[in-house]
Amino acid sequence: MASPEIDEFEHLIFDWEDGTLDATGIARLRDLLRTSPSVRKLYVERQMLGAMLKLEGDAGIAAPDVEHVGLKAATSSSAEQDTRGQFDSAEDPADLPFMLHSREQIGEATNPRYASLLFVVAVSVLVCVVLTRWMLVESRLQSAGQRVPAANDVLPEKQEATSAGIAVMTRLVDVEWQESERQFTVGDAVSVGVVGLESGVAQIEFFCGATVILEGPARLVLESSTIARLKSGRLRAQVPPAARGFQIHADELRVVDLGTEFGVAVNDGEADVQVFDGEVELYQSNGEQRLVTAGNAITRAVGGVVEAAQLTPDEYLGLEALDERVRNQKQGRYQRWLGHSMELRKDPRVITYYSMEQDRYWNRKLASSVVPENRDLDGAIVGAKRVVGRWPEKSGVEFKRPGDRVRVNIPGQFGSLTFACWVKIDSLDRWYNSLFLTDSYQRGEPHWQILDTGQLFFSVRLGGGPGKGHHKVLSPPFWDASLSGRWLHLATTYDVETKTTTHFLNGEKLSEERIPDQLFVQQTCIGKATIGNWSSPTRPEADFAIRNLNGSMDEFVLFRDALKPDEIRALFIQGSP
Amino acid sequence: MKDTEQTEFFVQHLTECQGRLFGYIYSMLGEHSRAMDVVQETNLVLWRKKDEFRSGAPFMPWALAIARFQVLAHVRDQGRDKCLLDSELVAALSEETEQQVDELETMRTALRKCMSDLPREKKGLLQLRYYHSMPIAEIADSMGRNVNAVKVALLRLRRGLADCMHRRMLEG
């Protein structure tokens, strides 16, 4: 019935699936697939059958009465071990595994299959959302840094899917970036590419689990989540067991980690490798391989000669020493902010200012920092918790529950306004997430909030007919999950001279928009208002009555003037954590 | 909200196509865990591009086109050492696979019927090999039979199953 070709193919594909087909067999299999349409058809049929059996298998294993095998038993090798273990110890080895899937289970596979698929989808969608948002920021940051990933004409999808990052920048101390390379901030995802330090220290945590401390001047090329190439400079790698196999390449030298802590330095064609703990394998370009154990060091001269060298661990900055420097830096930055804050309090343009400097945790009053002192401007904390702010020395207010808020009352009439705050957003749960909202929304009253799309939203009420009573100015989306938990500086200016509203993120202009004459309001006012929520909305039945922020704020300032971009920039720089 | 509806709709599509996506990708790669990886990558890309998908358009061809890109990328990255198919073969086999994937759910119903007709030890053999991805040598070992006997039995079983499914599908 079957032609010899088909017969041959069936054996070959069978062995290939089993992983026992040799190179000659594979070549023959490919040839058959290339030349014979009937083989191709059969290949697809057989593969499809395999896929369906897999799907049935995944479904059956997820059924409740074989729970102990675990959800991923079909794919995970450890679960396979389990199954086999039971198998071996069973009295009747032929029987037991077959009982894992009774006839009924096959028949009823639909539900658990669906459930497990749903689970897979739910997880993957979640992962997608997180990764997607991450990648968005990635691409935004990259384009901001004038760095575009290498064009890939044939397969653009792949390029996108792998740009999710392979490491995270976790600490930076006194860093000057090489001009041609991307500038990172703490918490940024790092993609395949170059990290170039002019000076300073960067701590990079690879997704595989390895941590690298890179000391400038240095250039490190990240090639994957397990491989990096040190072009120049010095690094120390700490590799926990989970990340074993992590590699640092230095010229043609490959350092493969076997669970350890080691240092690598590259300087003018010379490479040093020092092992502080555990051991590493060293591969040379001539194929030679050697093991370097703890307490030993080698140096490779320009010519390629490798010899033993003196161990000098102090030359390689470790995690603990870096921590010390980070703390010093933080302390320095806090002091810098404090100095700036003291000046800000005296600025006559300040309407109200909550510096939240050293407020007591039990104090439910949010003291206004304006000088000269005006206790009428103090805010009342409702529900919200006192938390640590940008630095351990500084406090902030955390908004979590729908009731959490800070109430303020700011009398007076104004023209131009500037809102600025340091905020840490955990997530944007509401359609409207409040930064600062006046209680009512009457003529001249401003609303400052963030949409769930991650866009800053600012409007001043004109009054008049419903819906038409204001001109809303939206920034492009600036927030996504990758910024979750990071301190951000947000500012918006309302300039009555130029009739423009401008949004800023971290001292940089996000967008600027001129307000149409018919919707422009010259005179502004605040009155009773709420930070981090919305109080007594005029229509309690309205859909969007809940506008609480999910996050923390540790500084808020309102000016009776539209600050210039460089002034906004200064607020950011002086307060940068 | 409109966007929410759109998202729910999309997630529903995405959920429904998981089996077929896996079928397609597994057919191209023939290895379970790598196929799962590529399914995840494909989901990721689909999710990212969800705004490009309009609710009126058929979802599956669009998803399969993206899956094909992901398979090609995977094949290109992993190279000939790991993958049986090269990009040329992926292209040559895609059309046939896409057609068969279209019928995957019908085929699965047929497969379940055929499986339920199998004697227990034959079913057990299939389960060891396909549900648990156990290598032939280990199956043979555990059953105290020689490798070739197990291989022949499995080959026959597979052929028998395929024939049974054809018949069942013709019966409807």
Image: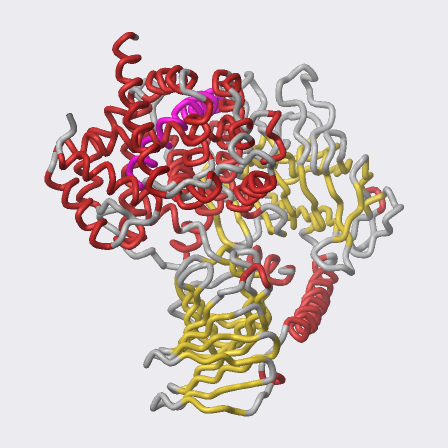
Relative vertical location of residue A209 with respect to residue A123 in this rendering, above or below: below
Report the residue at 73% width, 49% height from top: A353
Report the residue at 82% width, 39% height from top: A380
Between residue A429 and residue B169, name the one nearer to us.
B169
Horizontal and vertical percent position of residue A46: 28, 31
Q: Tell me the quarter of the image containing the C terminus of chain A.
A: bottom right
Q: Tell me the quarter of the image containing the N terminus of chain A.
A: top left
Q: Can residue A377 be seen at all in this image of the molecule?
A: no
Report the residue at 41% width, 30% height from top: B126
Q: Quadrant location of residue A546?
A: top right
Q: Which residue ends up furthest to the right in the rendered image?
A: A362
Q: Can residue A136 be seen at all in this image of the molecule?
A: yes
- Range of residues picked out in magenta: B1-29
Left or right? Give the position of B116 relative to A97: left
Q: Is B3 part of what is drawn in magenta?
A: yes
Q: Which residue ends up furthest to the left in the rendered image?
A: A35
Secondary structure mostly taken by the magenta-highlighted segment of the chain: helix
Left or right? Give the position of A454 relative to A36: right
Q: Is B167 part of what is drawn in magenta?
A: no
Horizontal and vertical percent position of residue A119: 53, 30
Horizontal and vertical percent position of residue A366: 81, 45
Between residue A397 and residue B162, name the one nearer to us.
B162
Q: Quadrant location of residue A526?
A: top right
Report the residue at 67% width, 17% height from top: A539
